């Protein structure tokens, strides 16, 4: 039996840009938590650390689609180099401002500039699409990318915190910045797999977010991102209530592992059902598997329930990105993928905030009700949007 993952890496150049893209995307997970850890250790508090990290994250959510829109018009190498250079210099200023105890406004200013960091998951997926457009291998490539995203979030955050605690406060942000600079350099040097610029000169360039399919998928994945963050916040709170706060990291790791394994399996299958129906089924499974979290009354049952609830996360992402590839014109593909990634990030930020308030107000287990509400909302959005999502470009 052939290995579909081996097949996608037999195409020339795929190993190179996938490896470089993995290194360059590690800052997605490393930078925000690295900023929090760096500033909390250096300044002795969490309010300023959280505010600076939120400034970076939310500004990046706004800027990344605009950068991707320009990439679609002018090409990856022309835009990624200056955008990354700005981000690298800004991260360096942020570390200097922290180490030298500069005024707080310099921290926020540096975080704003660092938000020029491009969306690497979108850039890598655009290259996979260029190589395997309209072939079954593209679904496998997107599955691999979803698994890579899971690894980034599993390893990146832990690596960033561990470096800062073990070495010095700025270590996490420093290594994150080095990954960004080295990974992006290796990525843009690979010209053979760079997507062609398909924007037509003289024709108004319509933003991908004006397309109904992108709006529906992005809105749905805001709620999916919120589920991801809510599960983490509620898990931390519940393990503390159960008297085993140290088990939180292990349980959260089980959550990501469940998603990782099922994502690899789904990517190896050549499912025949229309992608809009696959997304609907994945979200229905996500809702059903979220309900058992309410019954968790020990660390063991929580780990089992959290593993079960994670099985539909990667299939949801794989199908969503596959839909974007098929429902978005090629000339705005990178921007379309970036909007979906932005939706996930916004959902994670909002989900953490709402879940924190619910947990503080009603108890740790109540936080999982937020997950159920979010899963229901995502399923409803995609259910109502089936006709739109079924239309070809």
Image: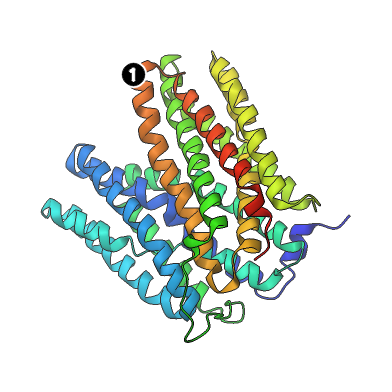
The residue sitting at the bottom extreme is: 201
- Density class for disc 1 (Cα within 10 Å; few <14, some 14-19, many ≥20) is few
Residue 261 pos. (x, y %): 68, 42
> Residue 206 versus residue 48: which sits nearer the camera?
206
Please state, as top left, top right, bottom left or bottom right, where the N terminus lies in the image: bottom right
Q: Which residue is mark 1?
A: 361
Q: What residue do we see at 61% from left, 24% from top?
A: 305
- The colour scheme used to paint the residues is rainbow
Q: Say above or below: 356 vs 134.
A: above
Residue 168 seen in this snapshot: no
Q: Quadrant of the C terminus?
A: bottom right
- Picture quadrant of residue 347: top left
Residue farthest right in this picture: 1
Is 113 left, or right, of 331 in this rendering? left
Residue 39 image point, x, y percent: 23, 45
Residue nearest the viewer, comparing 136 with 159? 136
């Amino acid at each position: 039996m052939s290995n579909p993952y081996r097949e996608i890496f037999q195409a020339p150049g795929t190993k190179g840009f996938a490896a470089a893209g993995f290194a360059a995307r590690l800052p997605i997970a490393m930078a925000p938590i690295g900023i929090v850890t760096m500033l909390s250790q250096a300044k002795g508090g969490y309010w300023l650390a959280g505010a600076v990290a939120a400034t970076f994250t939310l500004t990046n959510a706004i800027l990344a689609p605009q950068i991707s829109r320009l990439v679609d018009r002018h090409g990856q190498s022309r835009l990624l180099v200056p955008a990354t250079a700005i981000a690298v210099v800004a991260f360096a200023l942020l570390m200097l401002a922290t180490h030298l105890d500069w005024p707080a406004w310099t921290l926020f200013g540096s975080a704003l500039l660092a938000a020029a960091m491009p969306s690497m998951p979108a850039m890598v997926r655009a290259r996979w699409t260029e190589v395997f457009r309209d072939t079954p291998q593209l679904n496998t490539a997107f599955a691999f990318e979803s698994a890579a995203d899971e690894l980034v979030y599993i390893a990146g955050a832990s690596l960033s915190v561990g470096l800062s605690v073990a070495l010095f406060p700025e270590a996490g942000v420093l290594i994150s910045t080095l990954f960004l600079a080295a990974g992006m350099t290796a990525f843009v040097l690979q010209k053979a797999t760079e997507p062609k610029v398909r924007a037509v000169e003289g024709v108004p360039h319509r933003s991908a977010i004006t397309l109904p399919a992108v709006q529906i998928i992005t809105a749905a994945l805001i709620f999916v991102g919120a589920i991801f963050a809510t599960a983490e916040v509620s898990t931390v709170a519940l393990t503390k209530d159960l008297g085993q706060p140290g088990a939180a990291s292990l349980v959260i790791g089980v959550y990501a592992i469940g998603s990782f394994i099922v994502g690899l399996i789904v990517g190896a299958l050549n499912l025949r059902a229309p992608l809009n129906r696959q997304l609907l089924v994945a979200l229905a499974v996500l809702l059903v598997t979220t309900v058992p979290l309410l019954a968790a009354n020990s660390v063991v049952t929580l780990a089992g329930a959290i593993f079960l609830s994670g099985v539909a996360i990667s299939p949801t992402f794989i199908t969503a990105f596959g839909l974007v590839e098929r429902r978005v014109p090629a000339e705005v593909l990178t921007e379309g993928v970036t909007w979906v990634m932005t939706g996930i990030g916004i959902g994670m930020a909002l989900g953490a905030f709402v879940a924190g308030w619910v947990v503080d107000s009603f108890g740790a287990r109540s936080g999982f009700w937020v997950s159920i509400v979010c899963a229901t909302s995502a399923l409803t959005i995609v259910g109502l949007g089936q006709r739109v999502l079924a239309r070809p470009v």
